Amino acid sequence: MFVDVARIYVKGGDGGRGSNAVRREKFVPEGGPWGGDGGRGGDVIFIVDSGLNTLVDFKYQKHFKGGRGEIGDTKGMYGRKGDDLTVKVPPGTVIKDDDTGEVLFDLTEHGQKVVVAKGGRGGRGNMKFWTPQNKMPTFYEKGEPGQERWLLLEMKVIADAGLVGFPNAGKSTFLSRVSAAKPKVANYPFTTLNPVLGVVEVGDGRSFVLADIPGLIEGASEGVGLGHEFLRHVERCKVLIHVLDGAGTEGRDPLEDLEIINKELGEFNAKLLERPMLVAFNKMDVTEAQDNLLRIKTELEQRGYRVFPLSGVTGEGLRPLLQAAADAIAAYVPPAEPDIIDEEHVFRPKEDEFQVFADNGIWHVKGKEVDKLVAMTMWENDEAVKRFLRILRAMGVEKTLREYGAQDGDTIRVADIEFELSDEPIS
């Protein structure tokens, strides 16, 4: 089954909590805190595997989570790091943020590796909270939650050259003639519903990968006839080969076919019109194509196209086109802006500033940093709670609340924690 779009959920492992331990050794009075830090959560890592050519595995599994870090130990020992989760994806996979549509990664090379959700850091043990004023802290931090989000995966076929044209223009027959690929061939629209790849041997020692892109129709750039799903696979091709039905067997004019296809390509991605384009004037085994050749070839050559009369059925005229395609591929210079995001790039969500607002008599404080602080606080311990309040005050949360009109005694809610606003000193 060929699947080229998938929506999945990824979450880095939560960090392990710190340890709350006391050093108790003979002849060591008041040994002090001895609790170590928790282990970092495991990352979710995507790695490109050239042996894959579809996203079908993501049709059945949609949730991916890194391992949780282990709890810190006594004697100041760290907890073990959570296991990373490595997920294989096919080359050509584009990873987008499902909420914003932002492209996060573009994976094209075998072995390319990216972290899509980073594990949370381990919580600190009570050793880390020792101060001259508090030589025996009795609290620890809980582990930081791992990064999480929904991702949209899109696969774009990686081929050197792509065959574009209307349904039934003869692209599948062409590909089956020049390569070992066996696309389905029949006389009805949308015979090819998925891209088909074939390796073409030019005959002079050169070869290239050719893709049969499913037939395009007018309105494809707007999604008509599964247009977006088809056009996506054209974007990586270095050379485009327009396959024209030279005989006009369905009552269309070959010139109009080429104009419509170019219009759809340009509206989907204007840069596609900058790619080298060759014209395969197909079906020369049919009388009508022979009658149309001179008129159309003259017109297209005046527009700067190279036209190659051929027959996908008999194989006539294929070699000159294949040699020209191989030459164009060899001469292709990729765009200045790279398609591949640096493989060392790691997704780190932006830490937003906190926001405050009132709702039904309760003041709410929202923000990633304050939410993380809530998640890592040991609420059953008074010292930890006081530390939480001191950090909020240092962040300017209390000042902002009062500027917005909050008064002593008002209820403040941060994540799922509620407390009363007070200007009393925090001991």
Image: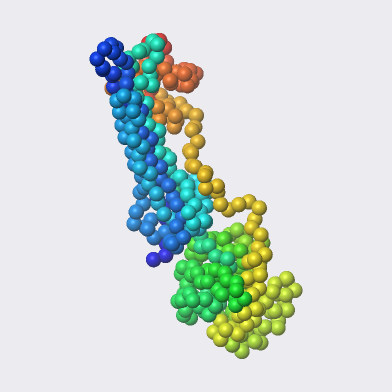
Quadrant housing residue 231: bottom right
Whole-percent x and y of residue 225? 49, 66
The N terminus lies in quadrant: bottom left
Question: Is any part of residue 275 visible from this angle?
Answer: yes
Position of residue 244 relative to residue 409, above or below, is below
x%, y% of residue 117? 43, 43
Give left or right: position of 371 versus 352.
left
Instruction: Say which of 367 and 47 sits in front.
Output: 47
Image spot of residue 82 (x, y percent): 35, 39
When the figure is inspected, residue 233 is found, relative to residue 424, above or below; the finding is: below
Residue 374, picture quadrant: top left
- Give the residue at x 47% y 72%: 192
Residue in the image at 46% along x and 76% along y: 182
Q: Is residue 89 left or right of residue 209?
A: left
Going 28% across and 19% down the picture, which residue do you hit?
A: 22
Q: Tell me if 255 is positioned left or right of 249 in this view.
A: right
Between 340 and 298, the residue placed more toward the observer is: 340
Toward the left, the furthest residue is: 26
Which is more toward the observer, 94 or 257? 94
Residue most extreme to the right: 302
Q: Is residue 379 visible?
A: no
Residue at the outermost bottom position: 287
| x, y percent for residue 305 | 70, 72
Q: In which quarter of the image is the C terminus?
A: top left
